[in-house]
Amino acid sequence: MIFTEAQRVTLRALADTFIPSIDGPAEHAAYWQRRGSEGVDLDKIGEVLDEQPAGAQAEFLKLLDLLDTVTLGLTWFGPLRPFSHLQPAQREKMLQSWSQSNLPQLRKGFHALRKLFVFLYYGSSSTEASNPVWENIGYAGPLPADDVVDTVKPIRTLKPTEDVVYDCEVLVIGSGAGGGVVAGELAAAGHDVLVLEKGPYCHGCDFTQREVDMLGKLYDGKGALSTQDGGISLLAGSCLGGGTTVNWAGAFRTPDYILQEWAREHMVPHFTSPDFQKSVDAVSTALSVNTDYPRHNGQNQALWDGSTKLGQHVKLIPRNEKGLTDSEAHFRGLGYSTMGDAYGIKQGTLNTYLLQAFEHGARLLADTRVERVTIANNRATGAVAVHTTADGQEIRVTVRARRVVVAGGAIQTPALLLRSGLKHPHLGRHLNLHPTVVVSALYEQAMNPWFGPSMSVVNDSFTKLSGTNYGAKLETPPAHAGLMSMVLPWLSGLSIRN
Ligand SMILES: Cc1cc2nc3c(=O)[nH]c(=O)nc-3n(C[C@H](O)[C@H](O)[C@H](O)COP(=O)(O)OP(=O)(O)OC[C@H]3O[C@@H](n4cnc5c(N)ncnc54)[C@H](O)[C@@H]3O)c2cc1C
């Protein structure tokens, strides 16, 4: 999306209100003076918007229109002037008013803008220059390339250069936890498998540890998807390996009481059968699930110590990692694996099942978005997709398949099936989210929450509340400058800078 000059003026004014220039202590004058518009690349906002659903794009443009009219004043009982014509203190007041508004649309607009600006300001950097803010907030940024895997990519993906038709026995759409395992197992069993993945294939040194770039490359909607009301941000991996390339490597087994609930309430006795446990054992072995990591990072240690002091039971989280040493490079680097693991330690499908699929002859096609599954006589017969080449050319891909496995994740699978014309009363209706609610605190010592195994400790004291199987797991996620700034409250320009 290319913004008009008027929209750019509004966006710059917003950036400077969310993150104003402040006369701070002389020692770090450059940090305090650097205002939002100096740190936020407006073209990046355009790129993020391009990846959002059409409805969300239209709403964002409507928001910018509102901010550029005199009627804006009616939304906060302020002067009848466009946002960019207000005094800095009035602009801040307007944003504060929207953040507390009784009108959900205004609160949603406030949060959409807040998240975009603070994320880009605190998370951006380029290969030429680090983010000048990081030094002042103590964030390490990308690490030196010690121990990073820089070998040739082990999987050779197909790279069509013109419109193409593929025939295969099994088409697998999506390469994450579901698609990756299915592709690996079927290929190893001798089936002719083709995998289509809409995200890119990255390996080792491609994972640059630069937050804005990696979220833009590896996450669905460039990491900026949210629920329609804007209340919950949706993070989902979108790259070869899907969520398993970017996740926090916590490899829990589904608890017995949940399996029993599924078997009982959904009439699927398989979940309580020895066969199901055998399948989980097989996946755990393939992913090298273990608890042998040598140490915790600051926030996991704090969770362990705090829970123990309170007499609450606390456990190690099994993690799918292999080859982890006690070296500083591994310890620090592992904390960046939510932007893809540059060290080859995390055993997502990228390093396990997809590799197995490739070694058994499966064909894999990255950067290929399936538009719809084709259907004839009530049977799936293949798919039509668009492959984007390295130089941005779009190529039509048609697949003819005897079987089609749709494993595009909880958000995209129903959308793809609906686009394909499937009809079922439950299709797209029962999405359950697993919200990650963050509690932050100030510690006396530096926590460096960007280093170390992301999630290594869990306190399960509150997982079964009020006699139900539901509650909260207490864990600590990795924290990097951009995402952390998004989950901290914005009360004023000064509060976010402190
Ligand atoms: C930041 C983060 C941390 C997490 N941490 C953990 C953790 O520690 N432990 C844990 O158990 N779980 C964790 N998860 C969740 C876990 O990764 C997911 O539950 C799991 O990956 C879901 O598997 P899936 O196969 O259903 O979908 P995904 O793994 O999301 O894979 C779906 C794939 O399909 C592709 N796709 C979608 N639509 C199309 C299309 N039209 N055409 C082609 N390809 C398409 C996507 O690009 C994606 O790569 C985390 C997730 C995230 C995002």
Image (cartoon, helix red, strand yellow):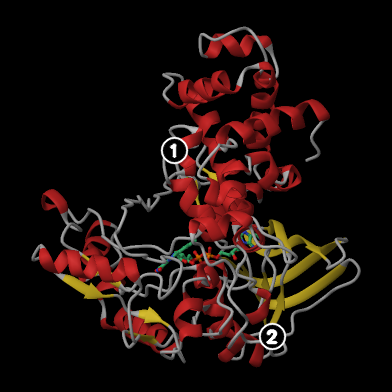
Residue assigned mark 1: 495
Between marks 2 and 1, how big is the CA–CA gap? Answer: 47 Å
Residue assigned mark 2: 155
Residue 241 at x, y percent in the picture? 58, 73
Looking at the rendered structure, the number of numbered marks drawn on it comes to: 2
Above or below residue 283? Residue 417 is above
Residue 466 at x, y percent in the picture? 12, 48
Asked if residue 155 can be seen in this view, the reply is yes
Secondary structure type for disc 1:
helix
104, 85: nearer the viewer:
85
Residue 313 at x, y percent in the picture? 13, 69
160, 239: nearer the viewer:
239
Residue 330 at x, y percent in the picture? 48, 84
At x 57%, y 72%, the residue is: 340
* Residue type beneath disc 2: Ile
Above or below residue 276? Residue 8 is above
